[in-house]
Amino acid sequence: MARDLAPEVERLLQTRDPNTKKKAALCSIRIVRKVPDLAENFMGSAASLLKEKHHGVLISVVQLCTELCKASREALEYLRKHSVEGLVRILRDVSNSSYAPEYDIAGITDPFLHIRVLRLMRTLGQGDADCSEHVNDILAQVATKTESNKNAGNAILYECVETIMGIEATSGLRVLAINILGRFLSNRDNNIRYVALNMLMKAMAVDTLAVQRHRVTILECVKDADVSIRKRALELVYLLVNDTNVKPLTKELVDYLEVSDDDFKEDLTAKICSIVEKFSQDKLWYLDQMFKVLTLTGNFVKDDVWHALIVLISNAPELQGYSVRSLYKALQASGTQESLVRVAVWCIGEYGEMLVNNISMLDVEEPITVTESDAVDALELALKRYSVDVTTRAMCLVALLKLSSRFPQTSKRIQAIVVQNKGNTVLELQQRSIEFNSIIQRHQSIKSSLLERMPVLDEASYLLKRAASSQATVSLTKSAPSAASGGSLKVPNGAVKPPPAPLADLLDLSSDDAPVTTSAPSTAPNDFLQDLLGIGLIDTSTAGGAPSASTDILMDLLSIGSYPVQNGLPATSNIGSPGQVTKHAPGTPQVIDLLDGLSPSTPLPDVNAAYPSITAFQSATLKMTFNFKKQPGKPQETTMHASFTNLTSVTLTNFMFQAAVPKFIQLRLDPASSSTLPASGNGSITQSLSVTNNQHGQKPLAMRIRISYKVNGEDRLEQGQISNFPAGL
């Protein structure tokens, strides 16, 4: 019907009656929407009707031109050549016209026509320098002459700013537009301020310097009573921060943090922490700002933020004394902020002697008097105050244990505090209490070496893992099987590094799930952050397995649970008949007989049984083989060594291997030896995988793989399923 009636509607566009023209233009809009192919039929009529004087016809025709531009590229180019001058004339006439009661709204002549014309100008000028140059002057005239004390005037100014930002405008015109938005921020109307903030966020990509001039006004909006304006202004302030203004802006935000509403503190705290981490070039300034945030809103600080703070402190030996003293004073002043308590407790446990003896004093510090008993008092108070929080209490117990080695005179008192948790209903705290008590009471010879300071934590690797953890966590929750990849991650500075899978929570005391982990390249790729509290502590360089939350935290000094690992073999206790426990007198050397209790007819398990290599995957391009190795005493764990060979005569680049396994299998994928695979088998890429089959003996291993690479710059992808693993894996 639209195709049949289009010629008749086009004829009606040329009639003399304005109302008929207006109705025909509106009908043409609907025809073009229904049948975009007919756009060419209306181009000439639409351009010629821009010379009309009747506003009703003009506003309809301008809308028709807008629809034609959307429907046809040819129509867009035609209107750029034949309608720009007409639009400029319409806008100039309506802006300069005298009072016309039939079109007047609050002293503004036909704001609806203003806005329609401005939108069409934006469509025509976007990406076209010549068209933009023709409309620059009239846009400047509208921006300067339109009154902003009426809502109709503000609507025109807002649309004018949108148009200036959308076309190839001159820099001076853009500054004028941003200044209009700055005036909007001082308006009492919340809606006007909100749209101004939205536009300023878009303008950041066009002219950051011009937006920076309104920084003070934007900061005031962060303190606005309207929550929507506060949040939008905070996002804009975050975009405004750079290396030159980070300190004054952060000071303003931290000062406001103290008086802000509780509902807003979480967002404000997150932005401040992000700003400080992103732009900090001075570690001392970073620590000062983080300590202020922890003191004011420590309950809103996310775990990964204070984990990063601890990592930085461990990497700054010259500031460790300053940190522990600052945190101790903050703890005394405000012990109700959870994250503050955790960081302070950890630092007191690690650097307690620096606190008591005023070691590594800075020029800006004043000496404080803290006795060994005062340090223990602070930990005891935190232990009692946070009786419900398992993580904080566990950290307090570890810190107390460390102080028992650093402050021998307080050892008896610390033991009494630790023993109070022997009957705790929380198994984690009960076990810690029993084992720590045993260390204090019975293992004096090894206590000092066991409770040494944490080794320096690899800050670069932690920050990289932290950056990847959120993305990897999202991808893992969306996919059914556990997956690990040896791909690459693009970090902010443009470098490309292999991404790890989600980093296990450094201080997680409650999770029993063993996450899928991927090692990042470093000097010791399998020995990243050993848990700050010693949870799940395992020497991966000798054991080779993935960290597990069930691993005994102190290598089972009480012979409860698993046994310590030495030189890659499990230490073995005396083996007797089932249920038999061989006891030794305290202090008596224990001679371990590996064959005790085994009859001559009992065969020893063959822990070194050889598994044949397999060709796991082969195509016309690639060949992948697997070699297998098992550790003694751990039949469910298997280490696989994958080798990739290029069967073509072209070098493969950007090589990435990914694997996914069912839920009952845990997978850890180490980084590949290279990302370039030489041609014609003149070299190979190797990669190690560690898998744990939690249903060993019941279900066999199964794995889906995906291999991506580039051939002469072209992306390629191969995938398949492996089910031919040797029996017994």
Image (cartoon, rainbow, N blue to C red):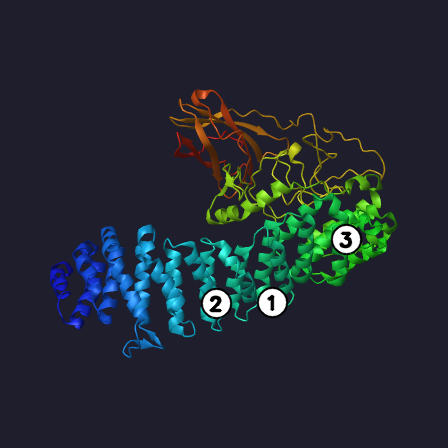
Q: Which one is in front in this view, the residue at disc 1 or the one at disc 3? A: 3
Residue 150: percent from the left, percent from the top? 41, 75
Three-letter code for the amino acid on which mark 2 is drawn: Arg
Quick check: marks 1 and 3 in contact, CB under 8 Å? no
> Of label 2 and label 3, which has the lower sequence position?
2
**Mark 1 and mark 2: Cα distance apart in space:** 30 Å
Residue 544 circle label: none
Q: Which one is in front in this view, the residue at disc 2 or the one at disc 3? A: 2
**Mark 1 and mark 3: Cα distance apart in space:** 33 Å
Left or right: 571, with 691 as reference point: right
| Mark 2 surroundings within 10 Å by alpha-carbon count, few (fewer than 14), some (14 through 19), many (20 or more) | some
Left or right: 207, with 286 as reference point: left
Residue 541: percent from the left, percent from the top? 65, 33
Three-letter code for the amino acid on which mark 1 is drawn: Asp
Mark 2 — residue?
Answer: 183
| Mark 3 surroundings within 10 Å by alpha-carbon count, few (fewer than 14), some (14 through 19), many (20 or more) | few
Left or right: 202, with 381 as reference point: left
Q: Residue at x 23, y 51 (%)?
A: 74
Mark 3 — residue?
Answer: 364
